[in-house]
Image: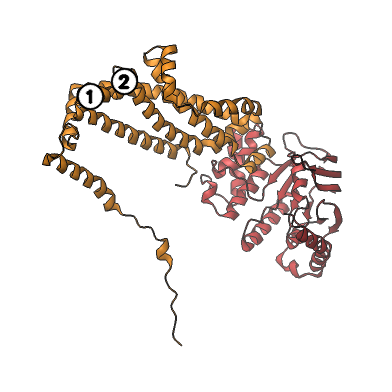
Amino acid sequence: MKLVRVPDRARALERREHPIARVLGVLGLLVLWEALTRTGWVPALFLPSPLGVLAAGVDMLRTGELLTHLVTSLGRILLGFGLGALGGVSVGLAVGVFSLAEAVGNPLIAATFPIPKIALLPLLILWLGIGEASKVAVIMLGVFFPMAINTYTGVRHADSQLLRAAVSFGAGRWSLIRKVMLPSALPMIFAGLKLGAGTSLLLLVAAEMIAANSGIGYLILNAQNLMETTTLMVGIVLLSLLGLVSHWLLTRLERVAIPWKRV
Amino acid sequence: MRVILQHVSHTYRGRGRQGVEALAGVTFTVEPEELVAVVGPSGCGKSTLLNMLAGLLSPTEGRVGFEGHLPSGRPPTAMVFQEFALFPWRTVQGNVEFGLEEAGVPAAERHATARRYVELAGLGGFERKYPHELSGGMRQRVGIARALAVDPAVLLMDEPFSALDAQTRQLMQEELLATWERTRKTILYVTHNIHEAVWMADRVVVLSRRPGRVLEIVPIELKRPRTEAMLGEPAFVRAVERIWALIKSQAQAALREGVA
């Protein structure tokens, strides 16, 4: 009897990692970009070379110009992000836990959430002046909504078995919030924080472009006015670094705060 | 302390629709140090019964309660859940401490008590593990340790081993019986497994399909401590056959109705 072998069908499910391709992709783009600018086909006014941008960045770092803008922007973003996250988690918890808060809060959030927050900046400037407060406030609003909605969703999706188990051991309302609902919502809260970090960067730049004389957004817009494309690119690279660092930090924090999640 | 159920009925109120009657006029008692099993076809309101004793549901009619002396500082009941219901963000030690926390036991005493029950459950060395790092059998040991740690007058068990594989289940049943021999804790044990009920219990309460009524209370005439050899004894086989005869037509009708 001839043996009919079992065909190996697992190949359709295979998913390989390509560690070299990961690096080569980024590196290749940079080399191509550098080469393109060196040929002179693309004028540096439109597209400065990567090495040129790096040199300009180092230069601006030395003069302290870059640091001033960075510190200003960071201050706005940290304050706005912190206040927005704190407010969002508190409101989300309240709306998730208390049925009265849910009845009042849910329609309010649903009605105000779709407003693009940057559209509120003129109003905020009118109310709070053109200084720091209006910029912090717009970032705060942008972070508040994803945080409130995510926290609320996390609380409402707390496992009913766990809630019942806690109650069967005599847990009261406050214990339930602290020991079941809040930890249940933590993964959603972190997803909200990451979302909020992106939003706050966007709003920061927008606010600084509209009404500021310092900060990264101002740096970029001002460089464009002066036709200093290299400086403009330094600003953009800095923003991308800020985004990467904040995401990395939040991911690290998430691992510490949610040690029970399999990653 | 005795557990008393008198003419207990429960009707779940659906939204707008008419309610679903889960239990109808259930009456029985559980004596101190007794291990009573409740069996019945699916959807007969077995879990409803336990939930009422745990204070998670109120009876629509009738009375549910306890009679006799409850030592101060001890809760009347603690529950072991079918799907374990461990807190994924708490370690083994943290899970076992939960009930003690809610009972207001001071931290040092709480740690020591929980540690003792962790050891008793054979979980020594696993104190700092999270539930997802444990096997099903280990998780339910945590669930049982969590319930025993508060030293309840009555231990309520809601199909505690039905989520486990057959071999683990057998071992866990033996462990539970050994624990019962040692502590003589009053246990009310809900299961759909007739063999399990007969092998473990002093008496088996047989419920009908929905709405659950007591069909019969079958006393089990097997000696203690129970051994595996008893699974072949005439008294065991008779009890199993008697209960299956009571349940079979009920289960068939439930199957036809398609109730979960």
Residue A28 visible: yes
Q: Which mark is residue A53?
A: none
Label 2: few (<14), some or many (≥20) within 10 Å? Answer: some
Q: Mark 2 falls within which chain?
A: A
Label 1: few (<14), some or many (≥20) within 10 Å? Answer: some
Residue A190 x/y as whole percent: 46, 36
For the residues labelled 1 and 2, the Cα–Cα distance comes to 17 Å
Task: Report the label total.
Answer: 2
- Image position of B165 (left or right of B203): left
The chain coloured red is B
The chain coloured orange is A
Tell me which corner region of the image, top left, top right, bottom left or bottom right, holds residue B234.
bottom right
Residue type of the residue flagged with mark 2 = Thr
Residue type of the residue flagged with mark 1 = Ala
Q: Residue furthest bottom?
A: A1
Residue A6 x/y as whole percent: 45, 75
Q: Secondary structure at mark 2?
A: helix
Residue A206 x/y as whole percent: 35, 25
Q: Which residue is mark 2?
A: A72
Residue A192 x/y as whole percent: 47, 34
Q: Is residue A68 above or below residue B131?
A: above
Q: Mark 1 falls within which chain?
A: A
Q: Which residue is mark 1?
A: A223
Tell me which corner region of the image, top left, top right, bottom left or bottom right, holds residue A100.
top right
**Which quarter of the rendering shows the N terminus of chain B?**
top right
